[in-house]
Image (tube, rainbow, N blue to C red):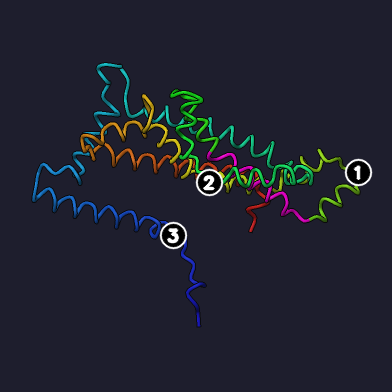
Amino acid sequence: MRRAINYVPDRHSGLILAILPFVFLMGIYLVGSDARLSANPDDKLMPGLKAFFDAINHLAFTENRRTGEYVFWTDTLISLQRIFIGLSISTVLAIVIGLPIGLLPYLNRLFGPFMAAFSLIPPLAVLPILFIIFGLGELSKIVLIIFGVAPFLIRDMAMATLAIPKEQIVKAQTLSASSWQILIHVVFPQVLPRLFDSLRLMLGATWLFLIAAEAIASEGGLGYRIFLVRRYLAMDVILPYVAWITLLAFLMDYFLMLGSRAMCRWHHIR
């Protein structure tokens, strides 16, 4: 008797199955929107598709008369710049700090408990402190992302390094490898796939930190725009922006997966 776990969809079936939940969700929304608009044509809670298209056309393809910018794309570039700078710095810190903590016993005893405690501090709780110290400009928003992401990545890299079999470290030493060579040639290649996975898992939190910072003090960005128009109940702007943020996060996750497969081919061989 064949069990359910042995039924594997082919490529086309898998694609259809992946799309079905989105189609189902969109269908529910359209039915609900049509019902609300039939009862009240001025309803703003669930606007129809035409309202979405009109709002996006105005923001993305109509030049702002005051600034001369295309608001949608300007917001996107501002937010992506903050995200990339924050994630890049966090990744470098994870490699430079996390790997030595996991490899060197003295550093592990000295900084391991500290990083474990530091990674548990809620980043949004210290957001007012960051604004006081770094001001309301770009720096505070990037620091918030680093504060929220880097400690987690550092701790995860240290734990991944500690999980490497000791036999490999011993064998490298018998071949006269220095601590630096072990770090570069033994440890780093093995934790690199874990780093990609950790970055993918932190994308949701990263966008959360960014939007929170943009909502409180900013003059541009996707989060800023969402909280700016909420006072007008402009769901025709808010919902497309939320969908766009989700798509951007999905694309970032996809490219990280491609990067992992390109740089860690041995890890993805099944």
The Cα atoms of the two marked residues, 1 and 2, are separated by: 36 Å
Q: In this rendering, would 68 be left or right of 203?
A: left
Which badge, 3 or 2, is on the more N-terminal residue?
Answer: 3
Among the 4 quarters of the image, the one containing residue 119 = top right
How packed mark 1 is, by other alpha carbons closer than 10 Å (few <14, some 14-19, many 20 or more), is few
Location of mark 1 (residue): 176
Q: Is label 1 in contact with label 2 (beta carbons under 8 Å)?
A: no
Residue matched to label 3: 14
Q: Give the answer, above or below, for where 168 lies relative to 70.
A: below
Q: Residues within 10 Å of mark 2 (few under 14, many from 20)?
A: some
Residue at the spot 42% in from the left edge and 58% down from the top edge = 12
User: Disc 2 designates what residue?
Assistant: 200
Residue at left offset 76%, top offset 42% = 107
Return the residue found at the far bottom.
Answer: 1
Contact check, label 3 and label 1, Cβ < 8 Å: no
**Predominant secondary structure, magenta span:** helix
- 157 or 125, which lies in front? 125
The residue segment tinted magenta is 148-165
Residue 153: within the magenta? yes
